[in-house]
Image (tube, rainbow, N blue to C red):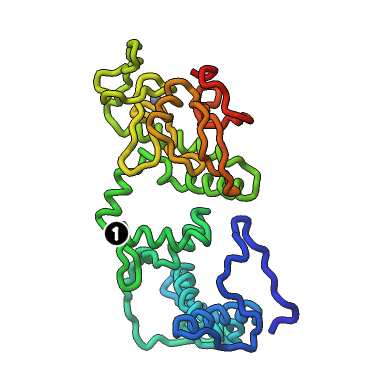
């Protein structure tokens, strides 16, 4: 044990107290009923205890040999280290293997033992071999090293790492071999087709967005500001995907409502861009403007405060900017209430409630 308990400063992005299990009594060496639970507890116990153990100590030996041939001097250098006091490594031997990988990257230091020789002694070579060494390509990512890399890039959070990995594996973008993950053809194709077209495949963009989301969580940023900027970026990029986006000029207004020849009969004209019409995508709970590719983001939800609006009510809302008095909304406390819905330029094209003590005269809104 070290003289003082060890403490660590947590990273800025750490989301703390997300542990599923924390040993409260270190005397309890096993816990859990099923094998997996026991293994998980053992893993956590090991980490919890290991982080408080003494440092591991090594004896490091560097051997330097000099050979002379004519006027030339050749120097051979080798460093080896042996573990003299295991410290925390006695509990987590698997970390040793990982560290050996790192160490092999740093030049010249291998973990082989190097004999201890008196200074200045003369050695005679008994044989000479020429070794043909080649540098190895970097190791592929394992699930663990990929998470490490994500952490380093500031992408993802402890709560999202498992779902990131699950998604890329389940969707077949990566295949898991015996040890490492390899990109599938589908994964490569996906990256090739997204790169340069969508900013969300860029590390910087994702890192900054994650930071913004953290800021929302800590109350330093407003949800709508962040999310609407992301939405705008995405809509712009989606719009540019089409080689020749159809920027339809605002169709001349015809009395009676219908403005575009291609619009389905009775389609509600988009109140915001006036060029598009509202469509309800199959299975969705909203009407959106069909000119979203030209940049119109207008949409209106079908269900508002648990009340499913009739098509007629949505049409009135979009055509007139306000509905009549509607009963049957349910507030967050579960209480029913009535209100008028407003949606116009004045509300920033968002649906808002207008409360009144009693239903106003319909004609004041029509
Ligand atoms: Zn529109």
Q: Position of residue 271 (x, y in %)?
A: 43, 22
Q: Position of residue 161 (x, y in %)?
A: 47, 61
Kindly tell me whether residue 362 is visible in this rendering: yes
User: What is the residue that sits farthest to the right in this orientation?
Assistant: 4
Question: Secondary structure under badge 1?
Answer: loop
- Residue drawn at (51%, 21%), measured in percent from left and top? 362
- Residue drawn at (44%, 69%), measured in percent from left and top? 72
* Image vertical order of residue 273 relative to residue 241, above or below: above
Q: Position of residue 284 (x, y in %)?
A: 36, 42
Q: Quadrant of ligand 1?
A: top left
Q: Position of residue 25 (x, y in %)?
A: 66, 84
Kindly tell me whether residue 65 is visible in this rendering: no
* Image vertical order of residue 265 relative to residue 123, above or below: above
The answer to whether residue 347 is left or right of residue 219 is left
Ligand 1 lies under 8 Å from the Cβ of mark 1: no
In the figure, residue 303 lies in which quadrant? top left
The answer to whether residue 201 is left or right of residue 54 is left
Q: Residues within 10 Å of mark 1 (few under 14, many from 20)?
A: some
In the figure, residue 105 lies in which quadrant? bottom left
Front residue of 39 and 92: 39
- Residue drawn at (30%, 26%), measured in percent from left and top? 245
Front residue of 100 and 343: 343
Front residue of 228 and 240: 228
Q: How many marks?
A: 1
The answer to whether residue 197 is left or right of residue 98 is left
* Image vertical order of residue 191 relative to residue 342, above or below: below
The quarter of the image holding the N terminus is bottom right
Give the labeled residue for mark 1. 172
- Residue drawn at (36%, 28%), measured in percent from left and top? 278
């Amino acid at each position: 044990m070290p003289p003082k308990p060890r403490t660590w400063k947590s990273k800025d992005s750490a989301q703390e107290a997300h542990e599923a299990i924390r040993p409260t009594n270190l005397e309890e060496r096993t816990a859990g009923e099923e094998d997996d639970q026991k293994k998980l507890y053992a893993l956590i116990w090991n980490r919890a205890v290991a982080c408080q153990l003494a440092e591991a100590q090594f004896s490091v030996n560097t051997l330097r040999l000099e050979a002379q041939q004519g006027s030339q001097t050749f120097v051979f250098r080798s460093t080896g280290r042996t573990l003299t006091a295991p410290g925390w490594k006695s509990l987590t031997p698997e970390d040793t293997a990982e560290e050996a990988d790192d160490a092999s990257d740093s030049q010249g230091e291998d973990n082989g033992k190097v004999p201890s020789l008196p200074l200045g002694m003369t050695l005679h070579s008994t044989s000479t071999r020429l070794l043909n060494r080649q540098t190895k390509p970097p190791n592929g990512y394992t699930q663990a090293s990929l998470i490490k890399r994500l952490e380093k890039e500031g992408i993802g959070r402890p709560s999202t790492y498992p779902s990131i990995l699950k998604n890329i594996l389940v969707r077949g973008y990566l295949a898991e071999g015996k040890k490492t993950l390899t990109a599938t053809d589908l994964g490569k194709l996906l990256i090739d087709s997204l790169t340069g077209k969508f900013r969300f495949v860029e590390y910087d963009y994702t890192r900054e967005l994650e930071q913004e989301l953290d800021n929302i969580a800590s109350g330093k940023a407003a949800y709508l500001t962040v999310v609407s900027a992301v939405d705008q970026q995405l809509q712009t990029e989606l719009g540019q995907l089409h080689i020749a986006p159809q920027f339809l000029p605002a169709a001349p207004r015809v009395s009676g409502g219908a403005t575009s020849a291609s619009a389905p009969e009775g389609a509600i004209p988009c109140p915001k861009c006036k060029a598009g019409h509202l469509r309800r995508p199959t299975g969705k709970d909203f009407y959106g403007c069909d000119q979203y590719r030209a940049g119109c983001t207008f949409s209106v939800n079908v269900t508002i405060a648990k009340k499913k609006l009739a098509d007629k009510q949505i049409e009135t809302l979009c055509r007139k900017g306000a509905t009549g008095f509607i009963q049957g909304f349910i507030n967050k406390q579960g209480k029913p209430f009535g209100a008028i819905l407003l949606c116009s330029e004045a509300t920033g094209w968002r649906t808002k409630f207008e409360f009144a003590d009693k239903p106003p005269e319909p004609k004041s809104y029509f």
